Image: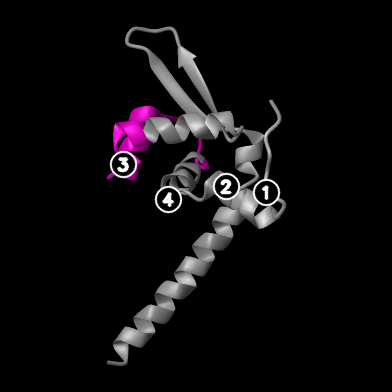
Amino acid sequence: MERKLPACPVETTLTLISDRWKILIIRDLMAGTRRFGELKKSLGAISQKVLTANLRKMEADGLVTRTVYAEVPPRVEYALTELGRSLGPVIDVMKEWGKGYQKMIDKESAKC
């Protein structure tokens, strides 16, 4: 089944990572493979249902791999694919922009 993508490359990127949780999942997986519980704990306020749905969508989009180990209890690990890792520079730019914005807001609030 062929997937229809937006004509605009920016819109295509946003289609893949626009959800608040997706970008944070990618951020956490940049450090390496994580188990479901580790991701949930790191993300805090996310529900199990929402985390599962986001991971499934990201797997379908080719950003994340899911590895299930035949153990008792079962162990499931998530990692970024090469495509998912290629979003590293995007995350880095967002981080730097956010730092600059935080500094600007801190300076403005200190003037009052």
Mark 4 and mark 2: Cα distance apart in space:
12 Å
Task: Tell me the SS state at disc 1.
Answer: loop
For mark 3, give the secondary structure: loop
Whether label 4 touches label 1, CB < 8 Å: no
Residue beneath label 4, please?
20
Asked whether 111 or 32 is in front, the reply is 111
For the point 58% across and 62% down, the residue is: 93
- Packing grade of label 3 (10 A; few <14, some 14-19, many >=20) is some
The amino acid sitting under disc 1 is Pro
x%, y% of residue 88? Answer: 60, 49
Q: Which label sits on residue 46? A: 3
Confirm or deny contact between disc 2 and disc 3 (CB under 8 A): no
The numbered mark, 2 or 3, whose residue comes first in the sequence reads 2
Up-down relation of residue 9 to residue 72 (above or below): below
Of mark 4 and mark 1, the one earlier in the sequence is 1
Q: How far from the left and from the top, in percent, is residue 28?
A: 45, 43
Residue at 32% in and 11% down: 73
Q: Is residue 67 above or below residue 27?
A: above
- Tell me if 24 is positioned left or right of 85 in this view: left
Q: Which residues are magenta?
A: 30-50
Residue 6 disc label: 1
Distance between the alpha carbons at the discs numbered 4 and 1: 20 Å
State the residue at coordinates (48%, 74%).
100
**For mark 2, what is the residue?**
15
Query: Label 3, label 1: how many angstroms apart (C-alpha)?
Result: 28 Å
Disc 2 marks which amino acid? Thr
Per the image, is 40 magenta?
yes
Mark 1 packing: few (<14 Cα in 10 Å), some, or many (20+)? few
Is the image coloured rainbow, by chain, by secondary structure, or in one colour?
one colour
Asked if labels 1 and 2 touch by Cβ distance under 8 angstroms, the answer is yes
